[in-house]
Image (tube, rainbow, N blue to C red):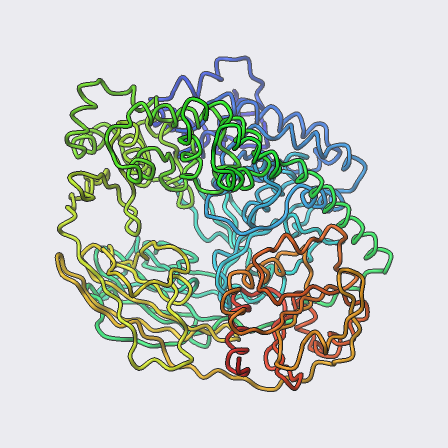
Amino acid sequence: MNSQTAVFSLDSQEREQIERKFQEKVTFAEARKDALFHIFDQELTEEETWALKYMFAYMPVNDLADYDGELFLNHVRQALDIRKRVPWGERVPDHLFLHFVLPYRVNTENIEDYLGILYNELAERTAQLSMADAILETNYWCHEKATYIGSDLRTISPLTMIRNARGRCGEESTLAVAALRSIGIPARQVYTPRWAHSDSNHAWVEAWADGEWYYIGACEPEPRLNQGWFSPPARRAMLINTRIFADYPGPEDITLKEKGFTEINLLENYAPTRTLYLNVKDEQGKPVSGASVRFELYNMAEFYPIAEIKTDEQGQASFKTGYGDLLIRVVKGGKWSELHYKAQDSEHIEFVLDSSKQPSGIVDFDMVPPPEGEGETVPALSEEKIQAHNRRLEEGTKIRTDYEGTFLDQEEAFTLAKKFDLPTERVWDILQKARGNSREIAAFLEERSGEYGEWPLRLLESLNEKDLIDTFRLALDDHLVGALSKRGDWDEDTFVKYILCPRVSFEMLVPYRRVLADAYTAADAAAFRQDPSALAGHLEKGYTYAEDLPNLKGKGNPVGTYSLMKGDEQSLDILFVATCRSLEIPARLHPSEQKPQFFRNGSWESAFRLDSQPNQESSSWGQLQLLRDSNASQDTPPASYTENFSFARLEDGVYKTLVYPYGSTDVYDEPYEVEPGSYRLTSGIRLKDGTVRVRFTYFTVRAGDTTRIALTYRETTVDIPVLGTLSPGSKLTLLDGSGADLKALLGSEGAIAAWIEPEREPTKHLLRELGELAEPLDKLGLPIVLIIGDAEWTASFDPASYPKLPARTVFVRDSSYASLSAIISNPAAHEAGYPHLFVVDSQDQIRYAASGYKLGTGKEALQIATAIIQP
């Protein structure tokens, strides 16, 4: 190709860079050269050639391991063809096409050949629209396909999302970005890595139309662009960013750019910003280059790095962020420095790397989030547009619920169970979780239960709930037959959890068992069973550590890592565990440390680390026993892991949070098995304004010893002011059509009341929280009145979808909004939107109010209700 060629408007320097990086990947992926690069032997156009080279040049390690070239060639050909077909194809600049239309990956989802499928769904219904209206229309389509539900960290693919008809916000936005790209519209997934004022995070979508980027809430349509329930929380964010798998030149602010991976900072489009300027020196006053600067927020009871930046040759770094507090930690070469940065502090900060031992004792401080802010005033929509939008929401919900009606039902599940003499409720539980994949799972049970009895069901029960929607018979057969052929004499619990179960971490489940078992001779397999550490040593010698992109670490499937003979540390650990299970060796990742272990002689032993770290025998671990605070007041919250406390070990100057189940409350019963080292216990109480009262407790765990540490929280005073009075006169309608009086529903002892919008994510968060709090709320015995206005009502709404709500929950409709209008006159509450949650006492006085999105409002309401009402 000569220097005058202008495919994708690439100049000679850009082409040279792509070619160089492409050749590096060809060399890097030598073990899979034929599977990946044989496509270049076909007749390709210049556009196809350069699109493929561009794609491979910036491809993550796990994608080189897990997928074949044909998948990427099909994706490129469809993307180029679609660009010619859509009416705005020529208006999308080449650089936007390359970075925000062509990419096959959005998040950490499994990659599938989805482009043509989504295009066929959307092309006709968007062909006559403007780009801006096509974005809105695509989101209505997404709403027809899926809605929100909380789930685990593994991101399902767009096609699986459609099959499942629901997913968390990261999956909703993955689907929406894929859908927009399928019709040639530049789109990107946007994240706040962690909220500052509330726990958890959120993801949404930005899409480009005729020269401008707009935002939308994925699968949550609005009648216009740049509108969403998350707009007010976004104004309190400390970082909003997006990831690009390329050397992206901007023009947006670039937070991180290394190894062909770019993070851009979009915060200034949503919130007031300031830039922090850091200067890092050593103890002699010399600049420290290459130091890691971590900007950390309190969230989910840990300090999470929302950004990590390296200092330049002058020891300097800068970061654009919001007007809230940060914990800034600078680390290099075993030395570190840490600062609690407050919003009112100077924007110029100096660090001296002079610490190599952690502090001792207890340190208390507050983390203050950015204040609430008001958004720009926008013209009110006409009643006609509002009604048309509500009709679209209603239609979309009906389309989705009609599809859910095609899932295998309870009667079919019971019939299948009885046919093979399987426990009916257990079979229904599995098939109900499988949702749109239920008939595939049922077919597996039908094909295999006759020969293997209850074992196919036991295999399915060993999987995560999400696995049931995207695992198919080919993989299930491989693991069932492969594991049972090596049943051995293990007890059932050990066999099911650590041999039969194919799930290791958050990798995609694939049929790996036969591949890995056949990789070794019978003699080698016997030797590894005798001494599993020999297998760890074999993998350590034969496989190469390769750093992957931060969010893709540990996502490689075992077959891909095996065939590439390279992987990041976590993916190599997953390969070890999967190989052990394939060879009848019980294995796991340690529950908290996430390090590979095998079971031998009645105990768990840590394998040699595949990154050449020393072996740790189980006898060298220590014990951490948490003690109750004998001086705790009645306002002290019940201990709950990652809700209000966590502990972390100091590793290479950084505190690494140990992994335990979210919300674990049995924290005092048994000691935790942990590695020796320096630890920090973090406890926190989040106040209503988002401020967190933080406490650090530092301690050391020694090998073979039990360290006892009291879990304490800072004292807080619960503020229970009288905020107003709830009007008792509103006339409401029960869902059966009969009338109801608000005062009668609230009763005489007080109540929790909320005006809700059932089809929107913030309300779904609240409903989930109320379900999780059903036991203490039932014990308190208060009525919970959930009120739906006419504009928020959809005929497809079914309270039966929320079977875990407290016993005294009642849903009603409100046509007048008389009570609500009187008590949310505050503009901030109006803009925050639904749900509007209140706690009222026996005199109908409002003692707590919260509007819009914020995790934990259910617990706050319970806390206030408990304090003011005598059960």
Q: In the rendered picture of this protein, how many numbered marks are placed on residues?
A: 0
Residue found at x 41% / y 65%: 277
Q: To which quarter of the image does residue 490 belong?
A: top left
Residue found at x 22% / y 39%: 598
Residue 758 vs residue 596, the one in the foreground: 758
Residue 406 appears at what percent x and percent y?
Answer: 67, 35
Please indicate, yes or no, whether residue 284 appears anywhere in the rendered image: no
Seen in the image, is 175 located left or right of residue 110?
right
Residue found at x 77% / y 50%: 394
Residue 203 appears at what percent x and percent y?
Answer: 56, 52
Please indicate, yes or no, whether residue 778 appears anywhere in the rendered image: yes
Seen in the image, is 306 located left or right of residue 428?
left
The single residue placed furthest to the right in the displayed view is: 384
Residue 846 appears at what percent x and percent y?
Answer: 64, 81
Seen in the image, is 605 located left or right of residue 667?
left
Residue 198 appears at what percent x and percent y?
Answer: 50, 66
Residue 644 vs residue 845, the one in the foreground: 845
Q: To which quarter of the image does residue 830 belong?
A: bottom right
- Please say if 713 is above or below 19: below
- Please say if 138 is above or below 307: above
Residue found at x 32% / y 75%: 712
Residue 400 vs residue 535, the one in the foreground: 400
Seen in the image, is 754 located left or right of residue 286?
right
